Structure formats: C-alpha cells, structure tokens
C-alpha cells in the first residue's frame, strides 16, 4: 500500500507542516476487501485540533485572508488539475481504504476534480447587492467568509464530500480544519498534498485524522471554529449540533436517508430498471442518498419485482480490485449491522440475492445484495436506513398512497418519480418532502452543480452548487448615510 502513496499517511498537516500527532499515537488501517492491516494513520487529539484552529486563524490573518477571490479560484482550479493527473492513484488508494470497486472509486476522484473546477470558477462570481433605501443613503451587502470552518467527513465518499464542502469553503475564503473518518483518511491526506502542491497557502487547509469522539468532538467544541459542516449519522449529527450550540455557530448537517423511487404504471421501465437497482447497490448501499425503497404501482408491480430480481440475481460481489458490481462493506461492524437487518427480514418475501464470487477473501466484509418485496410500510426495513445493499419494494394503488408512503419516514433526502405524465411529475415533485427530486432519473451522486441536502432527520443546510457558497459565507449589510 505504502508504495502507492506519495505522501506520509501517518502524519497530520497543520499550518503548512506535515508532522506526527501531538500524542504520538497511530490507528490501524484496514483493507475491507480482505481484513488485512495495511498501515496506520495518525490519531490526532484535542491538542492537534487546537493547533489546527490556531493555524487556520493565522492564515485568515495573513496571506490567505488577503488573497483575492480570483486568486483563490485559480488555486482551486490548479488543485483540480492536479487531481486529474492522479485519478488512477486516487482510485486505487480509495479502493484499498474503503473497499470501493475501482471504477466507482475513480468516479469519486473525477467528481473531486470537478468540484475544484466548479468552485475555482465560482470563487469570484459571488457578490452582494445594492438595496434602494431612504433618501441620502447608499446600502449594500457584502458576502464574507465565516472564518475558520470545521469539516467532519464520513468514510463512504471521502473525495466527493471533501470536494463539495472544503471546495466551497475555500472558494469563499474560509480557512478549513478537516477531520476525515478514522476508517478512511487516505484520500483526505492525498487531497492535502495536492492542495499544497497547487500553492494553497499554509493554514488555509489543515487535516487532522483521528477518532470521532476525540478529534471530531474537539473540533465541534472549539470556540475558535465559526462554522461546522458535518456529514455522517443522525446520532452524531445531534451531538455536533448540540456542541455547536454551545458556541452559537451555524452547522450544516448532511445525515442519512430512506430515499424512495416511485414507479407509476406508465413509466418507461427499460429506462428505469438500471436506476431502480443501481441507486441502491452503488458503494454496497453505503450511500446517504441510496434509494433503499422502491414504490411500484399495482399495474406494473409484478413485472418490476421480477425484473429487479433478475438484476439482483446477476450481481457479483467481491474485492475492490476485481471491480465487480459490489465491493465489501467498510468494516466488520457495518457487516454486523446489515446482517441484523437481513435477519429482521426473515418474515418478508425474499425475491433474489447476488452472489459473492469464489475466492473472495475470508476476512473481507461481504454481504449478498438482497431484494425484498411486499414489504409493509411500518416494517423496520422500510423505515430505517440500512447502509448496505438491501432494498425493499412496496406496492401502491394511486398517487395519494404513493405520496403517503414516500413521505412516511423520518428522512427526506432524495426521491425520484418515474412517469410519462407531465402533470403528475409536477404534482409529485411539489408534494414530496425531500431536498432533491429527480424525474425519470436518479442522480444525486453526480450533479456537482445541484444543491443537495435534506429535511427532517436527513439534516439541514445545502451543499453543492452555488447554494453552498451562500452557506459557507455570511452577509453583512452596510448602510451609508451621505445626505
Ligand atoms: P458517523 O456519524 O459515525 O461518522 C461521521 C464522522 O463523524 C466521522 O469522521 C467520525 O469520526 C465523526 N464523529 C464520530 N463521533 C463524533 C463526535 N462525537 N463528534 C464529532 N465527530 C464525530 O457516520 P459514518 O458511520 O461514518 O457514516 C455513515 C452515515 O453518514 C450514514 O448515516 C449516512 O447516511 C451518512 N452520510 C450522509 C451523507 C449526506 O450527504 N447526507 C453523505 C454520506 C454519509
């Protein structure tokens, strides 16, 4: 593994300097495809977080804070170009670290480059307004950075989530402290190395790997942090919001989902079928926007279940390097959680399961992708986020029932509607309670330009697109009386 890396993954990066964590400790790093230990990462602690926040503030008070938006944008664009030169390396690193099949890992690297390109280009295009006011006044608004922004990232899509949150924050002139997930830090450190190479001034980005309850909690509680972007589970999201409340700083929470695809009788099934299955099994179902529920109108119900079942039966599961449909889950713990859900599905109609390929290493965290049908809407598998390749199909009669089921969970991240009826498309898109609705497609994983985020227990605030630039900035109103 080490030979693939062009930076020292055992270190942290603070104020432009790679160094050992203050406590001197390391955390083991596992390859989910075979369970082997492939090295270690730094165990950053509160002392490192404090140093990182101090370094970020120093950057704001120094060269980074004085830099024009144009120049910030150019640096981000350069980072994107460097990412482009490393796509295969980044894909391999992510495949080893997260267990993601190579093609999917490479797509994440491509998305990271695209985020840098998008936010690089956008950096000097966000501006305030003038406001007509009383006679003798000129009033205008200024878009300003929050200051030091904290970024807590999960293990499932490190590159994409770093791209969308750190990219937007840097574009607006914030200085960032990034705490990647302890299960998958390697591409966060790679990104840091590329940002340094691209000329990002010291302290504008600081990366401190470590445990959530240690380094993560220290970052969310730090009084020198002015905004927190958190992507992860609902439980930890609540802790993050509570900690931020103590310092009265804004938070963006990107949490989980139970995202439905709704298939009406008049849908183009040939078009829909690849998305119905693909939107769940991507990254072994470990996707916040995974479509883990498919609601199907009675007239096409049997056909859709049968055709989805055929696809499930053909799915192949195996090591990331073999680049099959589905890789391992991230950890033994995640596998145990998903197997718990499968056991709870004992009373359900099991339609089909994919196969784990012969020779898949014993120590890998593999589960068979599984499709259940006729699932009652109040069943645990129809309500809870599974975060594994497990999908449920639920029948419905008409639009009203489809909406009631779609809106009948605690979550509200993404939904899609498959129908050729234009009026129905509009009605459904309005009435579904989610942050994104797709009509005759399902694509939350892409769409760098598209604002993304949830309502309900899926979180609040928006990242991606231009909207993120507003979230990562604050508005100042200047009212000048000149007579
Ligand atoms: P997690 O909440 O356990 O961990 C996420 C991050 O939070 C990690 O970096 C972890 O170290 C850190 N953390 C843990 N405890 C902390 C604490 N007390 N204080 C501060 N930080 C802490 O989530 P996970 O298991 O890594 O990721 C899976 C979850 O993330 C799923 O629920 C998934 O839906 C969600 N997710 C959401 C999105 C989205 O955009 N909405 C994207 C990806 C993942």
Image (cartoon, rainbow, N blue to C red):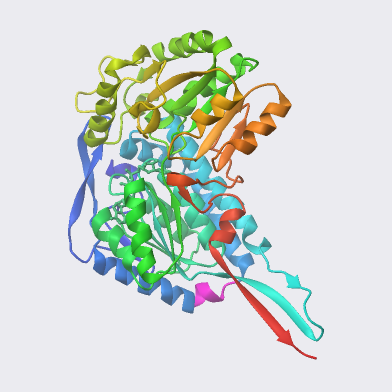
Q: Is residue 193 left or right of residue 119?
A: left
Residue drawn where x is 45% and y is 26% of the image: 293
Please state the horizontal and vertical placement of residue 108, each as a whole percent of the image.
Answer: 47, 39
Q: Does 303 sit above or below residue 1? A: above
Tell me the quarter of the image containing the C terminus. Answer: bottom right
The single residue placed furthest to the bottom in the displayed view is 483
Question: Is residue 63 located in the magenta-colored stretch of the structure?
Answer: yes
Q: Nearer the viewer, residue 112 or 86?
A: 112
Question: Is residue 304 located in the magenta-colored stretch of the structure?
Answer: no
The magenta region covers 62-67
Please state the horizontal and vertical placement of residue 476, each as a whole percent of the image.
Answer: 61, 74
Please state the horizontal and vertical placement of residue 413, each as a whole percent of the image.
Answer: 50, 40
Please state the horizontal and vertical placement of residue 193, each as a whole percent of the image.
Answer: 41, 56
Residue drawn where x is 30% and y is 43% of the image: 3
**Magenta segment, principal secondary structure?**
helix
Tell me the quarter of the image containing the N terminus. Answer: top left
Q: Nearer the viewer, residue 275 or 234?
A: 234
Residue drawn where x is 51% and y is 51% of the image: 164
Residue drawn where x is 68% and y is 27% of the image: 424
Q: Nearer the viewer, residue 368 or 255?
A: 255
Q: Quadrant of residue 48?
A: bottom left
């Amino acid at each position: 593994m080490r030979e693939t890396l062009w930076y020292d993954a055992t270190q942290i990066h603070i104020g432009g300097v790679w160094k050992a964590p203050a406590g001197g400790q390391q955390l083991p790093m596992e390859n989910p495809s075979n369970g082997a230990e492939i090295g270690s990462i730094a165990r950053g602690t509160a002392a490192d977080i404090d140093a990182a926040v101090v370094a970020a503030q120093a950057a704001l008070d120094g060269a980074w804070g004085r830099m024009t938006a144009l120049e910030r944008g150019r640096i981000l664009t350069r980072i994107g170009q460097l990412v482009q030169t490393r796509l295969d390396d980044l894909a391999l690193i992510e495949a080893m670290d997260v267990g993601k099949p190579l093609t999917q890992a490479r797509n994440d690297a491509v998305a990271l480059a695209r985020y840098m390109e998008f936010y690089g280009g956008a950096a000097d295009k966000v501006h305030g307004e003038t406001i007509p006011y009383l006679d003798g006044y000129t009033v205008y608004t200024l878009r300003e950075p929050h200051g030091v922004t904290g970024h807590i990232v999960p293990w499932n899509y490190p590159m994409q989530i770093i791209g969308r949150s750190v990219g937007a924050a840097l574009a607006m002139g914030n200085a960032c402290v990034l705490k990647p997930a302890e299960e998958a830090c390697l591409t966060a450190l790679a990104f840091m190395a590329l940002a340094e190479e691209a000329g990002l001034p010291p302290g504008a980005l600081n990366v401190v790997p470590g445990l959530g309850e240690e380094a993560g909690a220290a970052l969310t509680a730090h009084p020198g942090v002015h905004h927190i972007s958190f992507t992860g589970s609902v439980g930890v999201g609540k802790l993050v919001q509570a900690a931020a409340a103590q310092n009265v700083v804004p938070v963006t929470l990107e949490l989980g989902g139970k995202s439905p695809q709704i298939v009406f009788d008049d849908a183009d099934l040939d078009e829909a079928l690849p998305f119905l299955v693909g939107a769940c099994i991507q990254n072994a179902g470990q996707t916040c926007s995974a479509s883990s529920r498919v609601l199907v109108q009675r007239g096409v119900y049997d056909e859709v279940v049968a055709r989805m079942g055929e696809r499930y039966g053909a799915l192949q599961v195996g090591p990331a390097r073999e680049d099959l449909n589905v890789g391992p889950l991230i950890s033994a713990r995640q596998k145990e959680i998903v197997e718990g859900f499968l056991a709870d599905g004992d009373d359900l109609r099991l339609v089909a399961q994919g196969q784990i390929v012969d020779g898949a290493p014993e120590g890998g965290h593999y589960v068979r992708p599984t499709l259940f049908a006729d699932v009652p809407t109040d069943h645990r598998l129809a309500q809870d986020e599974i975060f594994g390749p497990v999908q449920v199909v639920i029948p419905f009669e008409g639009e009203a029932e489809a909406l009631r089921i779609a809106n009948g969970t605690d979550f509200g991240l993404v939904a899609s509607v498959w129908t050729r009826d234009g009026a129905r498309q509009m009605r459904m898109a309005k009435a579904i309670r989610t942050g994104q609705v797709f009509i005759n497609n399902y694509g939350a994983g892409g769409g760098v330009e598209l604002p993304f985020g949830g309502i309900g227990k899926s979180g609040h605030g928006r990242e991606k697109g231009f909207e993120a630039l507003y979230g990562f900035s604050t508005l100042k109103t200047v009212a000048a009386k000149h007579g």
